Amino acid sequence: MNKELKYVGKSIPIHDAKEKVTGKIKYVGDIRLAGMLYGKLLLSDVPHGKIIKIDTSKAEVLPGVVKVYTHLNTPATLYNSHKWTSGLKVVKDERMFTDHVRFVGDRVAVVVAKDRATAEEAVGLIEVEYEKLPVLVDPQEALKETSIKIHGGSNIISNREFKCGNPEDIFQSADFVVEDCVQTQKIHHAAMETHVCLASTEANGLITIWTPCQVVYQVQLITSEALQIPLSKIRVIKASMGGSFGGKGQPILEPICAFLSKETGAPVKLLMDRTESIIGTRTRNATIGKVKTAVSRDGEILARDIDVLVDAGAYFTNGEAVTIALGKKAFRLYRINHQSYQGKAVYTNSPIGGACRGYGSPQIHAITEIHMDNVARKIGMDPVEFRLKNLIHPFDDDLIGGPNLGNARAIDCVEKGKEAFGWKKRFNSPKQLGRYVRGVGMACGVHGNGYYGAYQDFITMDLRMTEDGELFLKSGIHDLGCGTVTTIKQIVAEVWDINVDKITALEGDTLVSPYDSAGTQASRVTFVCGECARITAELLKEKFLNYAAEIFNTHVENVEIENEKIWCKDDVNKQYSYSKMVLEIRKRFKDDSSLKYTYAAKANPAVYTANFVEVEVDTLTGLTKVLDVLAVHDIGKAINPGFVEGQVQGSIQMGIGFALTEEIMIDQQGKIKGDAFSKYHIINAPDMPPVKVVLVEEGEEHGPFGAKSVGEVATIAIAPAIVNAINHALDVNITSLPVTPEKIVEALNNK
Amino acid sequence: MGNFHIKTPNNIEELVSCLKEVEDKTYLLSGGTDLVIKLRKNKIYTGTMIDLSGVKEMKYIKVENDIIQIGANITFSEIIENKYISQHCTCLKEAAQRVGSTQIRNMATIGGNISNAAPCADSITALMALGAKIKGINSNGEVWVRELDEVVLGAEKNKLAPDEVITEINVPLLGGGYKSSFGKIGSRTAVTIAKLNMAVVIKYNEIDGVIEDVTVALGALAPKAFISNTVGKVLLSEKPSNELLVNFKNALIQEVDIAIKGRASHPYKRIAITGLAEDVYNCLFKVMEIGGGN
C-alpha cells in the first residue's frame, strides 16, 4: 500500500453540507405526512410516587384531541431500551407509560391530537393523583440496605470488579500513597435537534418509523419487544440527524410513536421540547470515584485502587454496561501491574443514565487524571513527566485480559503535545499576583474501537457497480452529523479510484440495509464499518478484475484499474470505462457486478489523546476562562482530517461545559434545576478558546488505511485538563465537577 | 385548539380603546421574548393579546426638557446604538449590551423588560441608578408618571393596573461631571442571566477630585433591584483611592450579608460582588490615577 492516497486523507465536505446550509434538508421535525397526528407527552412532575388516579376526560373532550394514552391503555410489557441486539441479557424495568413514577420526567401519558398546540393544551388538562413516596437522590444513600426501594429489590444494580496483581500488598509498603475522591455530574447531550420520531402504519400492518437514531436494528428490536409484534412488521429508517452524542442511542420515543400510529391508524409525530429532552431522555451518568495510588519516590506507579459509584438514575438501561466500560478503561492507559477496580451502579429518583459520548470514559478519566496531578504534586514531579514515566507502550497487553492495545501511541501524543504547547516553560512560569491568575494543565485519555472482545461486532455491506459506472453501497450505517457517509465513501473511492460523488452510500433502513450488529456505538464505525467497506470494495474489485481479465483475454495481473478506467496492459486498445465493463460482464457472464460481504472485527485497539490547556481564573468572581487548548490525537490515519478536526473542536466545546458549567442539578427533593437552556449553560462562542489539533498518524493494522476512532476519545481528556489547570493556577485541589465559580470561591476561602 | 384574539393598535388612541376592553386574560405583547415563553410554560392558549409593537408613538429616543425620553417599544439594540444613551447613560447602554443574545436584544423592548420585572433584569438596575421615571397611560387616556420603584413590584410582578401601559421611560439628563457604569456576573460571558448586577452613577468633580453625588443600584439580590444608600454614602464626598475601593467593597459585602444571609448563594455572592465592584469602579475611574492623594 505504498501508492499515494488519492481520496483518503483529504478534507472533503460532508455529503449533505449543501442541503444543511441552505435549510433544505428534511429533519423528522420537518416531515409532514397526509393525515398526520401529533403526540405530546405528559412527564411526571413528582420524583417518586404511585399514580392512584388519572383523569383524562377533560383532555379527551377538547376539540381536536384524538385519544389519550396512559398506563391503563398501553402495553405493560417491560423492556430495556439499552438492548441493541437479541442475545443481550438485560434487566427489563421500563414500560411505555408507568403507574409508578420514579423521577421528575417519567412518562405518565401522551395525547394524540390533530395539531401540536391542541396536544399541548390537552396535556395540561390531564389530572393525576399521586401517592407520594419518599425520594432517594443521593447515590451513597442508595447503597444502604435501608434505603427506599425504587424498583422493589435492592437499589444496587451492578457490582463489578476487575483486578490485576496484588495491589493490597503493594499499598502496605509504598513510599507514597495518595487518595482522592472525584465527583462528576449528570449532563445533557445538548444536540441541537431535540428527540423526535415519526411513525406510519400501512394497511398490511407494516409500521414505518423515521427516526434520527444511532442503531436502526435496535429501534426495530425494542419496538418489537414493547409492542409484541414481529420484526417483519417494523421498518426503521434512519432520518437526517441534528446531533446525538449518544442521547439518541437508546430508543425512547420510537416504540411509543409506533404504538400510537398502530392504534390510531394514522401517521403520528412525537416531538420533545428542550426541557423534555433534558429531563426525559438520557443523561451522562453521574459518578463518585475514590482513587488511591501507591507511587515510588521517583514517580513509578506501583499500585492503584479505584472505587466508583455510578448513579444510573431511575431505570436500569445501561447502568451496568457503563460501570464495566468505565472500569476497563482504567487498565489501558498506564502500566500498572497491581490494580483493582470496584464499580457499583445504583438506582436513584433522578433522570435516566444512558450512552453519552465517551460512555464512561469522561467520568473515569476525570477521576483518575485529576488524581494523577495530585499524585505528581505530592511527589514534587512535573505531571507530564510523571505520566510519561507510566504510560503504556505500543502493543502492550491489557492486564485484565482485554484486547491488545495495538499501535498505542499515547507517549507520542504526550511528547508531541509537550513540545507544541511549550509545556515546560508555561508550567514553570512564576504565578502572577492579583485578581486574575493563570495556570496550565494537561490530561490523557484512552478509548476503544468497537466491541471486539466484549460483544458481537460485525457488519454486512452490499456493494454494486451500476451500469453507468457508479458505485452503490447498501449498509446499516448512521451519519450522526460527523461525516460517516463521506468517510465510508472516501474509503471505497480509494480502493476503486473513483470520484467520491459517484458513490451512493445509503444509511440504515431495516427493510433494505444488510444487517449490522451494533450501529453507531462504541467508536466502531470508522474502524469496523470502514474496514468492512474497504474489504467489500476490494473483493468487488477483485471480482471485476477477474471478469475483465477474461474479457480482455489476459491474466488478471495484466488488468489495470485507474481513474475510472479499466484496461489491459498488453493492449492499449483494450480500455473500457467502468460502465462498459459492467455491461460486458452482464452480457458475457450473466452476472451482476455486485458483492455482499460480512466483516467481523478482528481487533479492538486503543486510541489515545493528550490535551493541554491554559486557563485564567478570576479569583473574585470565580469565573474561569479557557484561553488555549491543544489536543493531540493518536488517530492511526485520518480518513478525512477536516472531520477529525471538527470532531475534536466539538468535543472540546462539550468537555469545557462538563468541566465548568453544565449540570442537570437535582435537589434533595428530586426537583430538577437547570431543565432549560436559560439555566443549563453550555459554552457558547464568546467563551470558546482557540483549539489546535495535532494528529499522530502511525497506522493501525485492522483499521481501514490504518484509521482508528476519534469521536468519543476527543471529549474525555479536556475536562480533567481544565480542572488540573485551575488547580495549578490556584494551588488548590478541586475534585468536583463542574468547577463552578461558587466552588472556586469556596476553595479559595478554605485555602 | 385555543385561540388568541390579537389586537394591533397603530397609535395611542387605538391603544387606549383596546385598554378599555381589558379583561382577565388580556396580555400586552411587546417584544415577546419573555411573554411567549411564559404563555407556553403556563399553558395559556386563549385570551386577548394587545400587540404594542405597532404603536408608533412608542418608538423613539429624544431629549426634551432635560429628559431623555425613551419610547417603551425601543429595543435593546436600539438603545445600544443611540447617541444620547451613549453620551449620557453609559450604564444603561452597558446593561443593554449584556441583555440576552443578539436575537433577544433585537426583539426585547425596554418597556417589556420593566413590566416583566425580573429580579435580575439588567435594565432595571441601570434605570434605577439613573433615577428613571416611568410614564404610562390608562384606559381613560390619562397619562401618569411614577417612580420606577413604584412600577416594579419584583419577582416577575409589576404594580401596573390591568388597564395601564408603560409608554415611555424618562431618564433625567444628568449634567456635566456625571458618569455611570454597569457590571454583571453570570455563569458565562454572554447570553447569561445575572447572578449579580450593579449600576453606579456618580458626579465627579475633576478639579478637586471629589465624588459629589452618587447612586448605587444592586440587582439580583432581592425580589427587585434596589438603591443602596449605605454603599452610596461610602463613596460620597470621597476621592478615588485604593482605600476607597476597599471601603466600597466592604460596604457591598455588608449589603449582601443583609440581603441574602443564610441563602445557598450567600457565600459566593459576598465575594463575587467585590469583583463586580472592581469592574465598575475601574470603569468609572479608569481615566484617572488611582493611588490616593495627589
Image: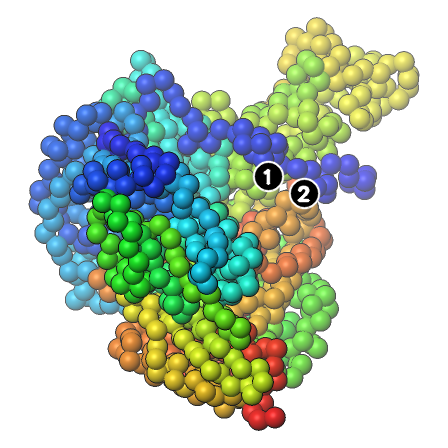
Give the camera-side residue of A308 and B14: B14
Against B57, residue B220 (above or below) is below
Q: Is residue A620 above or below residue A535?
A: below
Q: For residue A220, say whether it is visible.
A: yes
Disc 1 target residue? A483
Residue situated in front as seen by the camera: A489 or B291: B291
The image quadrant of residue A163 is bottom left
Looking at this view, name the residue that lies furthest to the front. B65
Residue name at image x 20 percent, y 34 percent: A122
Horizontal side, residue B101 vs residue A493: left or right: left
Q: Earlier in the sequence, mark 1 or mark 2?
A: 1
Q: Are marks 1 and 2 in contact (CB under 8 Å)?
A: yes
Residue type indicated by callout 2? Asn
Q: Which residue is mark 2?
A: A640
Residue at 65% across, 62% down: A630
Q: Is residue A569 above or below residue B208?
A: above
Secondary structure of residue under mark 1: loop
Q: Amino acid at mark 1?
A: Gly
